[in-house]
Amino acid sequence: PKVVYLLSYDPGIVSTALETALGVTDGRAYLEKIVHLPVVLPTVPAGTFHAFAIERLRDAVSDLNLSPLEARDLEDAFRLAAAMLATPRDVERLRTRMMYLGEILLTQVNLADVLILEAAAICAPGVVQWITRNVEIVTEGDSDQYHPDLLARGIFQTELVAQMRRGRAVDDQM
């Protein structure tokens, strides 16, 4: 009595888990017995989410001394990464990684490539494993030599985005 619990969950996932774990026929009906006042939050429009993601990612590298080419490449990568990410938590995880890695790797590699690879590591780790097994696509056959112009020609991003468009299910197949 006089105790209120606030639950935050995805009804589809929880109802399926209830059906599997408890063997109930209808997980949603079972949930209705537990949750007396459901409050459904509206879905954030995709454009709003992408704008949020891009702004947070820009903020992660804002203190770095980027060349105009690096800044342009990163702007393209921000849009690709925002399309890969699904939740604000994903955005913050990528932002944190880029804040840490940006300064360390700035003079070593193209940060746009790092951003896309880190987004893949968050969203679909199997894609990163695929890249590791197919280094010749990223390096044009010379695994000891990184080719910085790959980003400009879109070879790396094109293949990665093709893998990502298959959705998170591709992660299970890799």
Image (tube, rainbow, N blue to C red):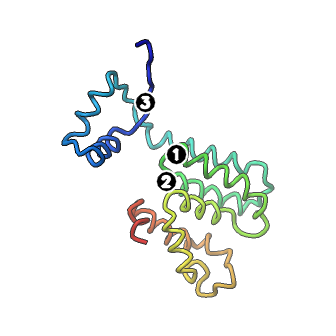
| Mark 2 Cα-neighbour bin, 10 Å: few <14, some 14–19, many ≥20 | some
What type is the residue that disc 3 sits on?
Leu
The residues tagged by marks 3 and 2 sit, at their Cα atoms, a distance apart of: 29 Å
- Pick the quarter of the image with the N terminus: top left
Q: Residue at x 32, y 46 (%)?
A: 17
Judged from this view, the residue extending furthest toward the top is: 2
- Of the numbered discs 1 and 2, the one sitting upstream in the chain is 1
- Secondary structure under the numbered disc 1 in the rendered image: helix
Q: Is residue 58 above or below residue 114?
A: above
Instruction: Return the residue at label 1.
Output: 50
State the mark number for residue 7.
Answer: 3
The residues tagged by marks 1 and 2 sit, at their Cα atoms, a distance apart of: 7 Å
Judged from this view, the residue extending furthest toward the left is: 25
Q: Residue 8: image x %, image y %?
A: 44, 33
The residues tagged by marks 3 and 1 sit, at their Cα atoms, a distance apart of: 27 Å
Judged from this view, the residue extending furthest toward the bottom is: 141
Q: Residue 103: image x %, image y %?
A: 78, 58
Q: Quadrant of residue 44?
A: top left
| Mark 3 Cα-neighbour bin, 10 Å: few <14, some 14–19, many ≥20 | few
Q: Residue at x 79, y 67 (%)?
A: 107
- Residues 100 and 46: in front is 100
- Of the numbered discs 3 and 2, the one sitting upstream in the chain is 3
Q: Residue at x 27, y 27 (%)?
A: 33
| Mark 1 Cα-neighbour bin, 10 Å: few <14, some 14–19, many ≥20 | many
Q: Residue 102: image x %, image y %?
A: 73, 58
- Pick the quarter of the image with the C terminus: bottom left
- Of the numbered discs 3 and 1, the one sitting upstream in the chain is 3
Q: Residue at x 50, y 74 (%)?
A: 130
Q: Residue 117: image x %, image y %?
A: 59, 64
What type is the residue that disc 2 sits on?
Ala
Instruction: Return the residue at label 2.
Output: 83
Report whether 22 appears left or right of 143. left
